[in-house]
Amino acid sequence: MKTLAIIGAGISGLISAEKLAPHFDVHIFDKARGVSGRMATRRSGEPEVSFDHGAQYFTVRSNEVKDMLGSWITDGVVAPWDGRVAVLKPAQAIEEEATPRFVAVPAMNVLGKHLAKDFSIQTNTPITKAQKADDGWHLTTNDGVLYGPFDILICSAPPEQSLAILGEANPFAEVLAAQSFDPCWATMVHFEQSIPTTYDGAFVHDNPLRWICRNNSKPGRQAEAECWVLHATPEWSKEHLELPREITPKLLEAMSIAIGQPLSNVIHATSHRWRYSAPATPLEQGHLWSDDALLGICGDWCSGARVEGAIQSGLGLSAEIIQNIAK
C-alpha cells in the first residue's frame, strides 16, 4: 500500500485522511497540541469555562456535505444552533439574520476529534521542510527529526506556511505566494451575570468588532456560564496585531458600544491572535494537485473560506487522488 503524509490536522486535512485511509497508509502531522485547526475551543479562567474562539458555527449548502452532516448529527457530534442572530448597526433597529447554523457539540473542536478518532496523529510536530527525492517525500521538523519517505504528500497548512515548508521549487509556489490571510483578534469573556440582549450572536457594523456571540447559547455548552466570544474586524486586527496588552479592554469597550449598554462584571477575559484567520481572496477552485510531484494542497482558502469550503476542499482532493493514484 502506498504511503501518504498529510501536514495539518484541520478539517480539510482530516476529511482527506478519512476518505483516503481505505486506499493508502495515511500519516498525519500537526504543529498544535490537538486537531481541528481554526475549529478551535479553549478552556481557561477560574472557574474553568470553554470558548469556541475560532470558527463559530458552520452552514451547509452542498448535497455532499448535507449527507455528511446527517451522519454527524446521528453520531451526536453536531447539532443545530437555534440561537437568534442579529445585525447591529449604529442608530438603526436590530435586524434578524435567519440562516440554519450548525455547531459541533459540546465544543467546535469535537468534529475534528471525531474525524481523527481512527488515526494516530503526530501532534506537537511542526514540519518545517518537505523535500521530494527519488524515493518519495521526506519531512523534517523544526528540531531536525526526519519522517518518510512518503509516496504522496498533502499540505493543508495556510498558504504562507505551506510555501515555507515546500520551498520555492514546488509546482504551486506562485499560487501560494499570491495568497494573503486576514488576521483576527478574538476575545473570550466570562461575565458574572447574563448580558440582557434579545440575541445570542450578532454581526456588528461600524465598530472594531465584526462578530459577537453568547457561547453558552450553543447546544452542549455550560448554559449557566455567561461566556461571550468577540471577533475584531480584519482592519482593526491588522492595526493592533502586535499590541496584545491593549486588545482585551478595547474590545470589551467595543462590545458595550455595539450592544448599547454597560457590561456585567467580568470574571475572566483573555484574547487570542489568529494570524491566519480567513483568506482575503479565496481561490474558489477547491484544491490543487500535481500528478508529477504527487503533491496536493487543500484548505478553506481553496474553496470559499468557510468550514463547508474546507470540507469540500478535502473531499475534492481525496477524490482526485483516488481516481488518479489509488490502485
Image (spheres, rainbow, N blue to C red):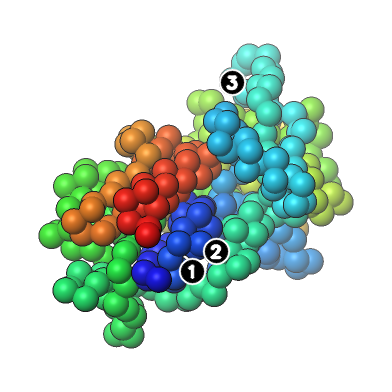
Question: Which residue is at the front of the view, 269 or 153?
Answer: 153
Q: Is residue 233 left or right of residue 155?
A: right
Image marks 2 and 1: residues in contact by CB distance under 8 Å: yes
Q: Residue at x 47, y 41 (%)?
A: 312
Which label was assigned to residue 292?
Answer: none
The residue where tag 1 is placed is 32
Q: Residue furthest front?
A: 327
Q: Position of residue 98 (x, y in %)?
A: 68, 22
Tag 2, which secondary structure? loop
Query: Callout 1 environment at 10 Å: few (<14), some (14 to 19), or many (20+)?
Result: some
Q: Position of residue 276 (x, y in %)?
A: 40, 51
The residue where tag 2 is placed is 35
Quadrant housing the N terminus: bottom left
Against 83, residue 105 (above or below) is below
Against 259, residue 92 (above or below) is above
Q: Is residue 287 left or right of residue 311?
A: left
Q: Nearer the viewer, mark 3 or mark 1?
A: 1
Q: Residue at x 33, y 35 (%)?
A: 285
The amino acid type of the residue labelled 1 equals Ala
